[in-house]
Image (tube, rainbow, N blue to C red):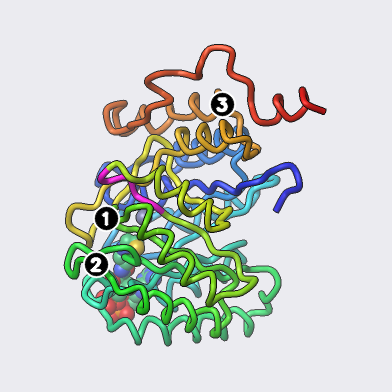
Amino acid sequence: MNPDTDVLVREMGLRDGLQMISTFVPTEAKLAWIRAELDAGVREIEVTSFVPPKLIPQFVDAEEVTTRAMEMEGLTVMTLVPNLRGAERAFALGVHVVDFVVSVSRTHNLKNVRREREASLEDFKRIVEARDAAGLKGRTRLAAGLSTALGCSYEGRIAVDEVRRCAAFLAEAGAEEIMVADTVGYADPKQVREVFQAVLAETGALPVAAHFHDTRGTGLANVSAALDCGVRRFDASLGGLGGCNFAPGASGNIVMEDLCFMLDSMGLRTGIDLAKLLAARAIPAQHLGAASLSGALARAGLPNHYQTATERAAATH
Ligand code: COA
Ligand code: ZN
């Protein structure tokens, strides 16, 4: 991680946010959105999803968005892939980070990617092999995401041991990061502690990231619980855009601006300029309507006399 930051915050809005939205956001607007967040200090952005465009037409421009995002200096470009075919498309472009997803819930995996969970886990092994065969080892990082790890709209609570076993399998297969996701926003902080402690105990030195949705208002409390476990990588989306087409009742990710504010208030440096981040909302707002974006910081503004984590650290030295 960059020595000037304590927590890595990653933008998911262009993928998680847009995958459920039928309004096509023009390619140029997607790129302007990415540029605005990069300029605000967001260093890792999931820019698109390599899914069949017939299934999700929003990502018909996946190749173009990825290629042009990769030309932006200082940006780590992440793309979601649901299977080997998607990974091959990402490898062809030499993407920096490939985020593979598998659901811990068997039912959600069947609905989402139309195959058994075990088949998806095996697919990840083939993805590692394909990455290495393409000569991209050490260049394209492979992250493995565990969807519905904290609850599923079809199956309800997910056993901690199931999450732990999937994490262990993916770590053993060569994942360079494990991402644990509360896809449908069912989690509470107590459960977050249990699940993350179990996963962290299994994965050793491997980075573990948290991906929370704020569907029931527990998102930032869950971040606090994950921080207590030692997690330092968090996914979020500008204005809390987000959801999953194959998980009934899913809604937005935790709000990027609110997350960055909370972390900064806690003295944890994110490297992100809050004012610039708030200004970036204008881009998705223009295409999706201002009402589709939520956020407490955008509504209330920064506290009077607010000093950033960096300013406070400088003042005490
Ligand atoms: N990108 C582009 N095309 C793809 C593809 C990909 N990632 N994966 C499969 N295809 C193509 C195949 O080549 C095949 O094409 P053809 O009909 O011309 O031969 C066709 O799609 C069907 O392939 P198949 O392997 O049978 O896929 P499927 O119909 O079983 O669907 C997924 C599986 C994974 C592609 C689909 O369920 C999916 O994209 N799910 C992701 C859902 C999602 O984005 N959820 C939210 C994020 S967690
Ligand atoms: Zn999500």
Task: Name the residue: 47% across, 33% down.
Answer: 257
Mark toward the start of the polypeptide (1 vs 3): 1
Residue 168 in magenta stretch: no
The foreground one among 138 and 30 is 138
Q: CA distance from mark 2 to mark 1?
A: 8 Å
Q: Which residues, given as a range, are shown in magenta?
A: 212-216
Does the rendering let one see residue 52?
no
* Residue 276 marker: 3
Q: Would residue 1 be found to the left or right of residue 88 on screen?
A: right
Q: Would residue 242 be found to the left or right of residue 174 on screen?
A: left
Residue kind at label 1, given as amino acid type: Tyr
The residue labelled by disc 2 is 157
Q: Is residue 46 above or below residue 82?
A: above
At mark 3, the secondary structure is helix
Mark toward the start of the polypeptide (2 vs 1): 2
Q: Position of residue 273 (x, y in %)?
A: 61, 29
Residue kind at label 3, given as amino acid type: Lys
Q: Would residue 125 be found to the left or right of residue 141 on screen?
A: left
Task: Name the residue: 70% across, 53% down.
Answer: 1
Residue 215 in magenta stretch: yes
Q: Position of residue 157 (x, y in %)?
A: 24, 67
Q: Position of residue 108 (x, y in %)?
A: 24, 70
Task: Name the residue: 49% across, 81% down.
Answer: 168
C-beta proximity under 8 Å, tags 2 and 1: yes
Q: CA distance from mark 1 to mark 3?
A: 31 Å
Mark toward the start of the polypeptide (3 vs 2): 2
The residue labelled by disc 1 is 186
At mark 2, the secondary structure is loop
